[in-house]
Amino acid sequence: MHAHDTNWSVTGVRVVLANPNSTVAITEACASLARAAAAPGTDVVPWTNREGPPVVDGLASDYLAGAALVRGLAELDRRPDAIVLAGFGNYGTGAVKAALDIPVLNMAEAAMACAVPLCHRFAIVTTSPRMIPYTEDVVAAFGFAGRCAAVRAVSLPPVDAPPAPEDAIVEQLAAEADQAHATVGADLVIMGGARLSPYAAALRQRTRLVVVEPVACGIAMAEALARIGLRQSKLGKFARPPAERDSA
Amino acid sequence: MHAHDTNWSVTGVRVVLANPNSTVAITEACASLARAAAAPGTDVVPWTNREGPPVVDGLASDYLAGAALVRGLAELDRRPDAIVLAGFGNYGTGAVKAALDIPVLNMAEAAMACAVPLCHRFAIVTTSPRMIPYTEDVVAAFGFAGRCAAVRAVSLPPVDAPPAPEDAIVEQLAAEADQAHATVGADLVIMGGARLSPYAAALRQRTRLVVVEPVACGIAMAEALARIGLRQSKLGKFARPPAERDSA
Amino acid sequence: MHAHDTNWSVTGVRVVLANPNSTVAITEACASLARAAAAPGTDVVPWTNREGPPVVDGLASDYLAGAALVRGLAELDRRPDAIVLAGFGNYGTGAVKAALDIPVLNMAEAAMACAVPLCHRFAIVTTSPRMIPYTEDVVAAFGFAGRCAAVRAVSLPPVDAPPAPEDAIVEQLAAEADQAHATVGADLVIMGGARLSPYAAALRQRTRLVVVEPVACGIAMAEALARIGLRQSKLGKFARPPAERDSA
Amino acid sequence: MHAHDTNWSVTGVRVVLANPNSTVAITEACASLARAAAAPGTDVVPWTNREGPPVVDGLASDYLAGAALVRGLAELDRRPDAIVLAGFGNYGTGAVKAALDIPVLNMAEAAMACAVPLCHRFAIVTTSPRMIPYTEDVVAAFGFAGRCAAVRAVSLPPVDAPPAPEDAIVEQLAAEADQAHATVGADLVIMGGARLSPYAAALRQRTRLVVVEPVACGIAMAEALARIGLRQSKLGKFARPPAERDSA
Amino acid sequence: MHAHDTNWSVTGVRVVLANPNSTVAITEACASLARAAAAPGTDVVPWTNREGPPVVDGLASDYLAGAALVRGLAELDRRPDAIVLAGFGNYGTGAVKAALDIPVLNMAEAAMACAVPLCHRFAIVTTSPRMIPYTEDVVAAFGFAGRCAAVRAVSLPPVDAPPAPEDAIVEQLAAEADQAHATVGADLVIMGGARLSPYAAALRQRTRLVVVEPVACGIAMAEALARIGLRQSKLGKFARPPAERDSA
Amino acid sequence: MHAHDTNWSVTGVRVVLANPNSTVAITEACASLARAAAAPGTDVVPWTNREGPPVVDGLASDYLAGAALVRGLAELDRRPDAIVLAGFGNYGTGAVKAALDIPVLNMAEAAMACAVPLCHRFAIVTTSPRMIPYTEDVVAAFGFAGRCAAVRAVSLPPVDAPPAPEDAIVEQLAAEADQAHATVGADLVIMGGARLSPYAAALRQRTRLVVVEPVACGIAMAEALARIGLRQSKLGKFARPPAERDSA
C-alpha cells in the first residue's frame, strides 16, 4: 500500500460536528465521543451554534437553533467533506441539507438508520418527559415511525444545573430501556439526546438491549457517505431555491 | 362602536393575520381576503414578518421565517384573541404555538381541517413544481396525509417578477384541479400558497371541484376557536420549556 | 357600522341542529350548548329525529337512525344555511351529505377537525365501554385515526334511567382524560357523546387537558363554512345518484 | 332431522342469500351463482330486501337499504345457519352482524378475504365511475385497504334500462383489469357489484388476472364458517346493546 | 347420500395437509383437527416435512423448513386439489405458492382471513414469548397487521419435553385472551401455533372471545377455494421464474 | 503499511461479502465494487453460496438460497468482523442474523438506510418486471415502504445469456430513474439487483437523481457498525432458539 501515501486513509475525511445549541460543554462531550468512534485519519472539527439557544428543549428553541444553524454553517470558511448535526432533534436539518452541497447528516437519523437493520423495533429514551412529543414528531419527520416502538424519558437536571450522579442517570436509562422491552417489545434503545450520549458505555453494562449512541452513528455514517460519494439529492426538497441558484 | 356594547359582532374578536414572509404586498392581499371572509365585528390586524425572508420557498427560508416569526409575534404589543399564520407552509407554526398562550392557527391546517368533512379526498395546488415535496411534508406534519390525494403545482413567476396574467394562472389552476380529479379522484382542491389565494373566486368559475381558499378558512376557524374558548394544549408539544415558565 | 344593516350579522345564519335520535331531552340539551356557542345572529333550529331510535348505542341503531335522518332532513320545509348533526357517531352522515346540497357537518368530525391543530394527540371519552369499538370506527371513517391516541369510556346510566350525579360523572371523565395523558400522551380530550357534552365546563375545572365539546365545534364550524361559502363536494362520494338528479 | 344425525352433507347448511336492494332480478341472478358455487347439500335461500331501495348506488341508498335489511333479517321466520349479504357495499353489514347471533358475511368482505392469500395486490372493478369513492370507503371499512391496489369502473346502464350486450361489458371489464395490472401491479381482480358477478366466467376467458366473483366467495366462506362453528364476536362492536339483551 | 353418488360430496376434494416441520406427532394432531373440520368427502392427506427441522421456532428454522418444503411439495406424486400449510408461520409459504399451480393456503393466513369479518380486532396467542416478534412479522407479511391488536404468548414446554397438563395450558391461553380483550379491545383470539390448536375446544369453555383454530380455517377455506376454482395468481409474485417455465 | 501497526486502518475490519446465489461471476463483480468502496485496511472476503441457486429470481429460489446461506455462513472457518449479504432481496437475511452473533447486513437494507437521509423519496430499479412485486415485499419487510416511491424495472437478459451492451442497460436505467422522478417525485434511485450495481457509475452520468449502489453502502455501513461495536439485537426476532443456545 506504499503507493497510496496520499490516499484517503492518510488525508482522511474532514467532518464538521455541529452542535445545534450554543453550549460548548455539550459540543466538547460530543466531539470526544465522535473522535472515539471515528476512523483513523478522520478529522473531527467541532462547531458550536453560538447564535443558537443554549439548549433545544422544544419547538421554539428548535426554530431558533435551526435558523442560526443554517446561517452559521453556510459561512464555514473551509468546506468539509461532511457535516454531522449533533443534536437529537430536527432544528432545521432539512434546511441545512437544502442550503449546502456537501453531505449533511443528523445524528438522530443516522442512529435510526443504523438501528433498523439491527432490531425488531427500537425505543428512544429522551432527556425529559416534556421532550417525548417533540421527539415523536422528529421520528416521524425523519421517516422512521414504523419501527419506533416507544419514546420514553429520564429526567435530566436542567442544562445549567449541577449534573446528576452518573449512576442515577444510568439506572434510569436502564429502567426505561427494560420497560420498553417488557411493554412494547423493543430490543434496541437509542440515546435520544446529546446529553445522554456519554452514558452509553455504562448503560451497555446494565441492559441486554442493544444500545445505540447517535454521535458514533453520525460520524461513522458520515464517513461512509463521504467515502462512497453520496450526498443529499438536489432534485427534491433539498434543492436550492431559484434565487440562490441564480446568485450562486 | 359604543352603540353596540352588548353585541358580540361589534366587540368581535381581534385576529392578527401574520404573513410569515417580509413581502408587504402579500400581507395586503391576504388581509383583503381575510376581511372579506371575517364575521362582522372581527378586527383583522395584518402583520408582516419583516425580519423574515421575502418568500418562503423551501426548507432554508422556512426556518429563517420561523425563527423571525417566533421572535416577532412574542413581542406583539397588544394581545389579540387569535393569530392566523397566513402562509401555506410550516415555518415554525408549532414553535409559535409553543411560545404563545392564545390560539394560533396556520392557514394550511385550517384549510385541511375544513376540507376533510367536505370531500372524499383533497388535492393541493402549490406555486411551483419545486414546492411539491416541501408541501407534501407540510401535509404530513399537520396530520392530514391520509386524506390528501395529491400535491400538484402551477408555475408562478418569481415573487419579484411582473405577475402573470390572471387568466393564464386560473387556467393552470383549473387544469391541475381537473387532473387531480381525473387521476386520483380528488373532489376538492386547496389553494396551496398565499400568492394563489386571490385566484380562488375565479377558479370556482372554472372547475367543478370545491375550491378551498386557506385565508378564509384560517380567519373563520380562528374566530370559531376564539369564540368557543379553545386554544392549543399546553400539556404536550406546545408546552413552554421550563426556563420560560420560570421567567414568565 | 350602520351601513351594514342588512348584512350577515343581522340576518345571521340559520343552522339546523339535528339530533340523530328521538330523545327530545337530548335535543334540548344540545340546543342549549349550541346557542351558547353560536355567534350573535345565528339562528339555531333544534330538530329531533323522531322516526329514529331513542339512542344510537351501536351499529344497528346507527343504521336505523341514519335512514330516518336522511328521510327526515330531506323534508325540511325551510332550507337552512347549514346542518349540524348533533350525535357523536356516524349514523348516515355521508348519506345526509349526499342527499343535500347545503353544508352538513357531523359534530364528531367538527370536534376532531378543531382538535387536530390544537394538540399533539387527542383522546375521546365515550359514554360506555361498549361504545369504544363503535367510536374507534367512527374516528377512522372520518379520517382522524392518525391523531386519535385512545378512545376511553365512562359508564353513564341508560338514557331512560335517572341521571347519575354530575360530580360522579365529571370525576370519571377527569380520570379517563388524565389516564389518556399518562398512558398515551394525549393532551386534549373530546367529549365523545351528546350526553357528555353538558359536563364539558365542569370537566375543564378538573383536568389540565384541553377539553373539546363537539356541539360548540359543530355550530362554530358550520357558521364558518356557511359564511365562507363552502359545502361538501358533489364530485365524489357525496354526489347524488343519477336517478335523483334526473327527478330533482 | 333425526334421520340425519351423523351426516353433515345431507342436512347441509341453510344459507340465506340476502340481496340488500329490492330488485328481484338481481336476487335471482345471485341465487343462481350461489347455487352453482355451493357445496352439495347446502340450501341457498334467496331473500330480497323488499323495503329497501331498488339499487344501492351511493351513500343515501346505502343507509336506506341497511335499515330495511336489519329490520327484515331480524324477522326471518326460520333461523338459517348463516347469512350472506349479496351486494358489493356496506349497507349496514355491521348492523346486521350486531343484530343477529348467526354468522353474517358480506360478499365483498368474503371476496377480499379470499383474495388476500391469492395475490400480491387486488383491484376491484365497480359498476360506474360514480361508485369508485363509495367502494374505496367500503374496502377501508372492511379492513382491506392495504392490499387493494385500485378501484376502477366500467359503465353499466341503469338498473331499469335494457342491459348492455354481454360482450361489451366483458370487454370493458377485461380492459379495466388489464389496466390495473399494467398501472398498479394488480394480479387479481374482484367483480365489485352484484350486477357484474354474472360476467365472471366470461371475463376469465379474457384476462390473465385471477377473477374473484364475490357471490361464490360469500357462499363458500359462509359454509366454511358455519361448518367449523364460527360467527361474529359478540364482545366488540357486534355486541347487542343492553336494552336488546334485556328484552331478548 | 345415495342420491348424490356422482356429485362433489362423494368424489370430494383431496387436500394435502403439510406440516412444515419434521415432527410426525404434530402432523397427526393437525390431521385429526383437519378431519373433524373437513366437509364429508374431503380427503385429508397428512404430509410431514421430513427434511425440515423438528420445529419452526425462529427465523433460521423458518428458512430451513421452507426450503425443504418447496422441494418436498414439488415432488408429490399425486396432484391434490389444494395444499394447506399447517404451521403458524411463514416458512416459505410464498415460495410454495410460486412453485405450484394448485391452491396453496397457509393456515395462519386462513385464520386471519376468517377472523377479519368476525371481529373488531383479533389477538394471536403464540407458543412462547420468544415467538412474538416472529409472529408479528408473519402477520404483517400476510397483510393483516391493521386488524391484529396484539400478539401475546403462553409458555409451552419444548417440543421434545413432556407436555404440560392441558388445564394449565388452557388456563394460560384464557388469561392471555382475556388480557388482550381488557388491554387492547380484542374480541377474537387466534391460536398462534399448531401445538396450541388442540386446546381450542377447551379454550372456548373458558373465554368469551371467539376462538379461531387455524387448522379448521385452513381446511375449510382450502375446500372453498378448490370448489369455486380459485388459486394463487401467477401474474404477480407467485409467478414461476422464466427458467422453470421453459423447462416445465 | 508497517508504519501504521497500531492503527485501525491497518488492522482494519474483515468483512465477508456473501453472494446469496451460486454464480461466481456475480460474486466477483460485487467484490470488485466492494473493494473500491471499502476503507483502506478493510479486508473484503468474497464468499459464494455454492449450495444455493444460480440466481435469486423469485420466492422459491429466495428460500432455497436462504437455507443454504444460513448453513454455509454458520460454518465459516474464520469469524469475520461483519457479513454483508450481497443480493438485493430477502433470502433469509433475518435467519442469518438470528444464526450468528456478528453484525450481518443485507445490502438492500444498507442502501435504503443510506438513502433515507439523502432524499425526499427513493425509487428502486430492479432487473426485470417480474421482480417488481418480490422487491416491493422486500422493501416492506425491511421497514422502508414509507419512503419508497416506486419499484420499477429494466429487462436484463437471463443470467446465463450473453450480457446486453452496457449502453443499452444504462439507457434503460436512466429512463426508469427519470420516469420515477417525473411520475412520483423520486429524487434518488437505488440499483435494485447485484447485476445492476456495476452500471452505477455510468448511470450517474445520465441522470440527475442521486444514484445509490448497494454493495458500496453495504460495505461502508458494515465497516461503520463493526467499528462502533454494533450488531443485531439478540433480544428480539434475531435471538437464537433455546436448543441452539443450550447446545452452543
Image (cartoon, coloured by chain):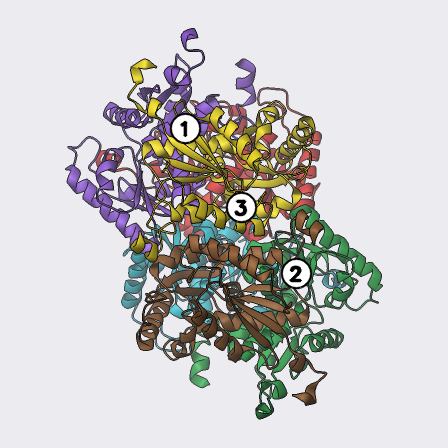
Chain colours: A green, B cyan, C red, D purple, E yellow, F brown
Residue D52 seen by the camera:
yes
Q: Position of residue E204 (x, y in %)?
A: 59, 24
Q: From the image, which quarter does the N terminus of chain E lie in? A: top left
Number of residue marks: 3
Q: Which residue is mark 2?
A: F101
Q: Is residue E109 left or right of residue E2?
A: right
Q: Which residue is mark 1?
A: E43
Type of residue at label 2? Asp
Is disc 1 in contact with disc 2, using a CB cutoff of under 8 Å?
no
Relative depth, front residue between C38 and E59: E59
Q: Nearer the viewer, residue B58 or E3?
A: E3
Image position, residue E194 (x, y; %): 56, 36
Marks 1 and 3, the one that precedes in the sequence: 1
- The residue positioned 69% from the left and 32% from the top of the image is E164
Instruction: Decide which of E64, A18 is in the foreground and name it.
Output: E64
Q: Chain of mark 1?
A: E
Q: Mark 1 falls on what kind of element?
A: strand
Q: Which residue is mark 3?
A: E52
Secondary element at tag 3: loop
Q: CA distance from mark 1 to mark 2?
A: 46 Å
